[in-house]
Image (tube, rainbow, N blue to C red):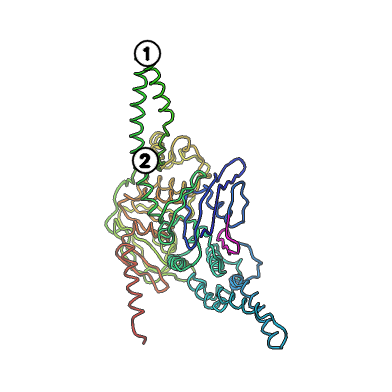
Amino acid sequence: MAEISVNGLQKYFGETHILRELSFEVYEREHVSIIGPNGCGKTTLLKILAGELAYDGGSVSIPRGRRVGLLEQLPDYPPELTVRQVLWQAFAHLEEMSAELRALERDMAEGKDADLARYATLQTAFETAGGYETDMRYAMMTNGLDIPPEMQERPFMSLSGGEKTRVNLARIMLSGTDLLLLDEPTNHLDVDSIEWLEEYLKSFKGAVVIISHDRYFLDRATTRTLELDDGVITSWPGNYSAYVDRKKELAEQLEAAKKRQDREIERLSFTVDRMKGWGIGNSKLMKRAFAMEKRLERIERIQTIRREHKMRNKFSTAERSGNEVYFLENLSAGYDRPLIEHFDATVFRGERIAVVGPNGCGKTTLLLTVLRLLPALRGTIYEGVGVKNGYLPQTITFAHPERTLLDTLLYETHADTQQARDRLAAFGFTGDEVFKVVSVLSGGEKTRLKLCLFMNTGVNTLFLDEPTNHLDILSREWMEDAVDDFSETMLFVSHDRYFINRFATRVWEVTGEGVRDFVGTYEEYRAARAAEKARAAAAPAP
């Protein structure tokens, strides 16, 4: 049974036709992703499905009685409302049912006439909706999404953006929705919370529609992919990785078919021209030529799939650093109090170290301390010979945002105009794009420009703090292509498991008890961590 039926959906913003006669269905218990570049209309579509935004043509049908939960921009609440009160709003419909049940029970206890049929129906509905399990569900959700008791007593409006996202996500999932519409649900979640969410969605009995740029999450949480591009939607079976493979295979097939078709069109055109030349004065031959020409006109040209431009250039370093890039001895890092204490480590040239851990544990603090942008509270940091750092912070800024991209490269790399244009083209800035002012760039474009500068200033040690945050999938792939062949040293903080899995050769796990140093890939680290948890669970209680 279809939980969502969309037929001929259209949406305009002014004169921009953002959704062009979309038609698709989402079925019961199906988990579907909507992917596409930033600004293509994904969030607009989700709001239309939730009934929060009007549309200009077509239809959207959701079965009557379905409860729809939408995770999107954060709602405002009265300043005195606590997190606990916000979360318990999810049970408002159950509390109404409970109040009516208690009223009917009082009537029965007092010997008054009570609607026994209504009581039986209501009790069944209350039990089916999980009315007797609210405390258990509340505890499970707050533990899984890392909403501790002290946070539950704070005013909701005093929370950070990431904390509000977690609370809002918990509220929606507690509300007993039949249809979940999730817009970037993993934003502001640490890896443990994301993995908990994946497991929760596996057991969720309703349909789920997800917008996300987290490819690892999409692979684990979805079974079908809707690609929205240029106002048109295409359905692909399977998760994100299956979509990539199928689209690549189809693109290759279409390109081969188009080449065959082009050769056939060229052959027929040549034949038509020759027959017309020979047919002068020969009406029968001329008639055949015109018939063949009509046949040519009726041929439906094969349309190939547009392939995204890939990075053409690679990082070049002016000189290599020494073998020992950083030596950390008894390092303590933090602000008013230490977040990390007594950490010893040596960073070797060519290592790619992922710094992972829960939100607020000190990952960025550790990065800034190693960079010596933040003073160490205790201990020593030795920087090796020939180290030249490049730092990509979460929020990318430029000293002169009023300059064009071309001027930025001319001033900061001392290249000539043609060299600067060539280097910008290697990072996807071509034609008139080089005259864009830096201040108007998107997050993905700023990341590309900063990496372009690093590439051309001899950086041999990269520090990246959440480099894929707020980037769409295409921008993430651009960035990964840029650093893929970077053969020197890289330290990075990330919750993007796809990125971590691709690059990490060593993992620093920051916990409340210190930093665990694991040499190996991210998958090897996860396997070791899972084995430790299994051993701990199997160990007899003391």
Residue type at mark 2 is: Leu
**Labels in figure, total:** 2
**Residue 223: mark in rendering:** none
Q: Give the image location of residue 190, x and y in percent.
A: 45, 65
Which sits in the foreground, 471 or 217?
Answer: 217
Magenta segment boundaries in residue numbering: 61-73
**Quadrant of residue 75 within the rendered picture:** bottom right
Q: Residues within 10 Å of mark 2 (few under 14, many from 20)?
A: some
Which element carries disc 1, helix, strand or loop? loop
Q: Answer whether residue 67 is magenta in the image.
A: yes
Q: Could you tell me if residue 151 is visible in this image?
A: yes
Q: Who's the residue at 55% across and 74% down the image? A: 128
Note whether 194 is above or below 312 in the view shown: below
Q: Could you tell me if residue 334 is visible in this image?
A: no
Residue located beneath label 2 in the image: 254
Q: CA distance from mark 2 to mark 1?
A: 40 Å
**Quadrant of residue 423 within the rendered picture:** top left
Q: Answer whether residue 490 is magenta in the image.
A: no
Farthest front residue in view? 284
Residue type at mark 1 is: Asn
Residue located beneath label 1 in the image: 282
Dominant SS in magenta: loop
Which element carries disc 2, helix, strand or loop? helix
